[in-house]
Amino acid sequence: MRLAIIDLGTNTCNLLIANIEKGKYEILYQGKEGVKLGKGGINKNMLTPEAFQRAGTALKKHLQIIDRFQATEVKTIATSAVRDAANRNDFVSYLLKETGLKLTVVSGGEEAALIFKGVKLAFGQIPPHSLILDIGGGSNEFILSTENGITWKRSFPLGMARVIEQFHISDPVKPEETAAIENYFDSGLTALWNQLEGKMINRLIGCSGAFDTLADLLDETAPGTKFRTTQDIRLDDFERISLKVIRSTASQREKMTGMDPLRLEMIIPSFIFIRLIINKLNIKEITQTGFSLREGALYEQINC
């Protein structure tokens, strides 16, 4: 079968198309469109009329690609911004009428489980003492696992679109603003710190999103031109790139090779967030993977 998977996230709408045959898969296409569903309403748990329109436009563009590849099945998954919206039913109805696509709105726990399956597809066997992290616009998912599966997972509504809407961020960001954002994350992650107290976490596995941008900046590769199943990132390289980005102006970031225009604003709180995780948990290694929720849905189809 030829499967198309659409991941309608808070910041971007991602598309994956793959062939599946006899338990094996081949990825034929990956792409994304900006939607910024959180703009102007995420902290009020509302999707604005403009967000409705941006989502409809993105899905129609993806449908043109899906038609070109002649996919036989389409799965459309929506996450944090949609699941938390008071007007989510209106949003789902609007997109069904506009595109013919029916959204499956997943819970935070279901989102984390799909991310885990995507990482499992990338690694085969996930290294021990690893913490999986997916940074989103609306939420961030953390997963602890062993060879036998997930031991703990949690979705935190601390996404980068929420931060952008809540905090004034100067250009460049001021040290006191950086501290305020870090404190916001720190206090919001109390359940994570409690869960991991006394546990050894050596490796942070960063899924997609900001971690893709990090790898692109390190490799000086244009966004979307190099897809990585996994790539190890040295801590000193992360430190160097994150400091450079956090201290930069928006115009300076625009000129950086590897900077995704869709993450121009959100990369600042994203790197503040990653730095906090590394420092609090004394992380020794980082591995980036381009596999996440979409690949998790692919994993389910392969193994159904």
Image: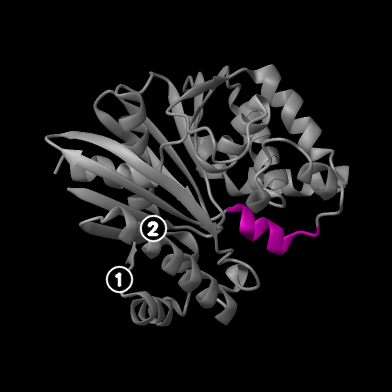
Image coords of residue 233 (percent x, y): 58, 21
Residue, x 33% and y 48% (percent of image)?
Answer: 17
Assess disc 2: are there few (<14), some (14-19) or many (≥20) residues with their C-alpha within 10 Å of its C-alpha. Answer: some
Stretch of the chain drawn in magenta: 159-168
Q: Amino acid at mark 1?
A: Lys
Image coords of residue 200 (percent x, y): 48, 19
Q: What mark, if any, has residue 231 been given in the picture? A: none
Q: Earlier in the sequence, mark 1 or mark 2?
A: 2
Residue 265 on the magenta segment:
no
> Which residue is more in the foreground, 226 or 128?
226
Q: Is residue 233 visible?
A: yes
Image coords of residue 8 (percent x, y): 44, 60
Q: SS class of the residue under badge 1?
A: loop
- Above or below: residue 180 compared with residue 61: above
Instruction: Say which quarter of the image contains residue 99.
Output: bottom left
Image coords of residue 271 (percent x, y): 68, 38
- Report the residue marked by disc 2: 65
> Which residue is more in the foreground, 2 or 38?
2
Instruction: Say which quarter of the image contains residue 74.
Output: bottom left
Q: Main secondary structure of the magenta part?
A: helix
Q: Amino acid at mark 2?
A: Ile
Residue, x 28% and y 36% (percent of image)?
Answer: 26
- Above or below: residue 170 compared with residue 231: below
Residue, x 43% and y 59% (percent of image)?
Answer: 79
Residue 161 on the magenta segment:
yes
Q: Is residue 83 visible?
A: no
Left or right, residue 243 beside residue 304: right
Q: SS class of the residue under badge 2?
A: helix
- Report the residue marked by disc 1: 102
Q: Nearer the viewer, mark 1 or mark 2?
A: 2
Disc 1/disc 2 C-alpha distance (Å)? 18 Å
> Which residue is more in the foreground, 143 or 66?
66
